[in-house]
Image (cartoon, grey):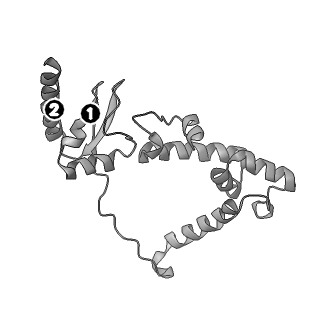
């Protein structure tokens, strides 16, 4: 949720939605789980609150006068199903072959490096790169909502590992073209 993300430091602007950033959203979720556990002190209630919100779980606990998750009948159906789905997934992931699953190896991995951009919007550069490179940049930076980086501050762009020099060359070429167009 936008409001929860904002509460845990995730930014959402025209340029970025950090809820889509794998690393930042995971760190925020960890902090949210810690806070929920401090409040409920029960992992079933924590998972239910993560799914439907702590206010709704608190109302159900008060209504049913119990903190036994399995007795909270007033929770929404999707939340009541969330815990069993979560538990069954955890059991399967411990030994997928036992249950007839084969976990495929990822086709790509996050083998990346970071490039600090100082107040430089990367507009058409992302579009001007070869399609393969553009899709890789988008894959490594899923928080970007536009084909651009924010122009109002520093931005850390993830690029494929070992491609920093090539990327900087593209960036410099693009900046020269842009500067020439602006002078005309």
Q: Nearer the viewer, residue 105 or 20?
A: 20
Alpha-carbon span between mark 2 and mark 1: 9 Å
- In the structure shown, which secondary structural element does the residue marked by tag 1 occupy? loop
In which quadrant will I find the C terminus? Answer: top left
Q: Position of residue 4 (x, y in %)?
A: 59, 40
Q: Nearer the viewer, residue 181 or 112?
A: 181
Residue annotated with mark 2: 174
At 42% across and 34% down in the image, what residue appears?
14
Residue annotated with mark 1: 122
Number of numbered callouts drawn? 2
Q: Nearer the viewer, residue 112 or 94?
A: 112
Q: Where is residue 85 in the image (x, y as percent from the top left)?
A: 60, 67
Residue 63 to residue 158: above or below: below
Q: Do the residues labelled 2 and 1 touch (CB within 8 Å)?
A: yes
Disc 2 residue crowd, few under 14, some 14–19, many 20+, Cα 10 Å: some
Disc 1 residue crowd, few under 14, some 14–19, many 20+, Cα 10 Å: some
Residue 7 to residue 44: above or below: above
């Amino acid at each position: 949720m936008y409001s929860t993300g904002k509460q845990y430091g995730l930014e959402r602007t025209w340029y970025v939605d950090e809820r889509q950033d794998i690393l930042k959203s995971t760190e925020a979720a960890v902090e949210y789980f810690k806070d929920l556990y401090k409040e409920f002190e029960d992992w079933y209630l924590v998972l239910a609150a993560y799914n439907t919100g702590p206010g709704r779980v608190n109302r159900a606990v008060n209504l049913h006068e119990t903190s036994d998750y399995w007795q909270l009948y007033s929770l929404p159906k999707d939340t009541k199903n969330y815990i069993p789905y979560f538990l069954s997934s955890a059991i399967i992931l411990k030994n997928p072959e036992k249950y007839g699953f084969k976990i495929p190896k990822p086709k790509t991995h996050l083998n990346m490096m970071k490039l600090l951009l100082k107040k430089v919007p990367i507009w058409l550069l992302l579009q001007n790169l070869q399609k393969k490179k553009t899709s890789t940049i988008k894959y490594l930076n899923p928080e970007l909502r536009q084909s651009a980086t924010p122009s109002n501050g520093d931005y850390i762009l993830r690029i494929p590992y070992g491609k920093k020099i090539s990327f900087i060359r593209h960036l410099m070429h693009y900046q020269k073209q842009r500067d020439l167009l602006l002078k005309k």
